[in-house]
Amino acid sequence: MLCMENVTKTYEMRRQTVAALTEADLSIPAGDFISLVGPSGSGKSTLLVMLGGMLSPTSGRVLLDGESVYDLDVDARARLRKSKVGFVFQTFNLIPYLTASENVQVPLYLSGTESNDQEQRAAELLDRVGLGDRLYHKPAELSVGQQQRVALARMLANDPAVILADEPTGNLDPETSEQIIGFFEEFNREGRTIVMVTHNPETAERAKRVLKLRDGKIVDDRASIQTVGAA
């Protein structure tokens, strides 16, 4: 499903070359659930956005379903993301002047879905995440946890096979974090592949695999405690 082959990403900063990711090799089969852990600046977010086709590597290849993502032109890469990849961010990235329903409809509109179908699909997805009574509320009228659930519904709009999440529980209280992780586990049981950046050790262990990065390198790749305990 997802693969990195000897991927390196460097930046030029103050006339020095800084490596954000170094010679990363990674294979993520369909239906896997991986958490990315490590200190700030270790390369977690760089790895995540490169998997999602949003940041070209300096060298190496990223493959999605056997297709070399960065050998595609910009338009083809955007189509690939739109059809197969869903993103969830710590900051939600909701459009403040749109309602919850309208925010969920954005990717459907961009993919050419009919207006009536957009509204119906948005209502179904918001109901799934427990916001069926908040369709017409704007982000400022929702709690932080509710805003993240709108972001989850929007991410599901185009039925992605791959979900990439960057600190999805970072701004949430423990009870709401538990709820959001429960949704990710549910999405994974449906067969979706999930890669999630987190600083929370307990959240990390809810995945099937825990991948640890340090100084731009993958230094550990192991089954989670939850997975080992279930074996």
Image (cartoon, rainbow, N blue to C red):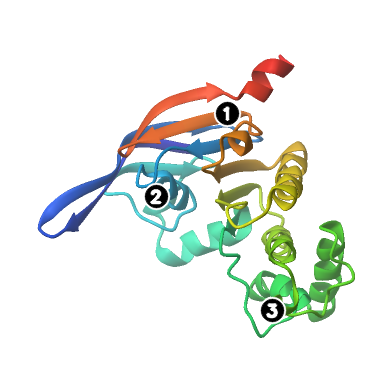
Residue 75 lies, with reference to residue 229, above or below; the image says: below
From the image, tell me which residue sits under label 3. 140
Residue at x 64%, y 81% (from the top left corner)? 96
Task: Return the residue at label 1.
Answer: 209
The location of residue 9, given as percent across then percent down, is 29, 47
Residue 178, percent from left and from top:
73, 45
Count the labels in the image. 3
Amino acid type of the residue tagged 1 in the rendering? Arg
- The structure residue drawn at horizontal position 55% and vertical position 58%, both measured from the top left corner, is 81
Farthest residue to the left: give it.
15
Q: Which residue is mark 2?
A: 46
- Inter-mark Cα distance, 1 to 3: 36 Å
Q: Label 3, label 2: how many angstroms apart (C-alpha)?
A: 30 Å
Q: Is residue 162 above or below residue 81?
A: above
SS under mark 3? helix
Which callout, 3 or 2, points at the residue further toward the start of the chain? Answer: 2
Quadrant for the C terminus, please: top right
Q: In which image quadrant can residue 123 be found?
A: bottom right
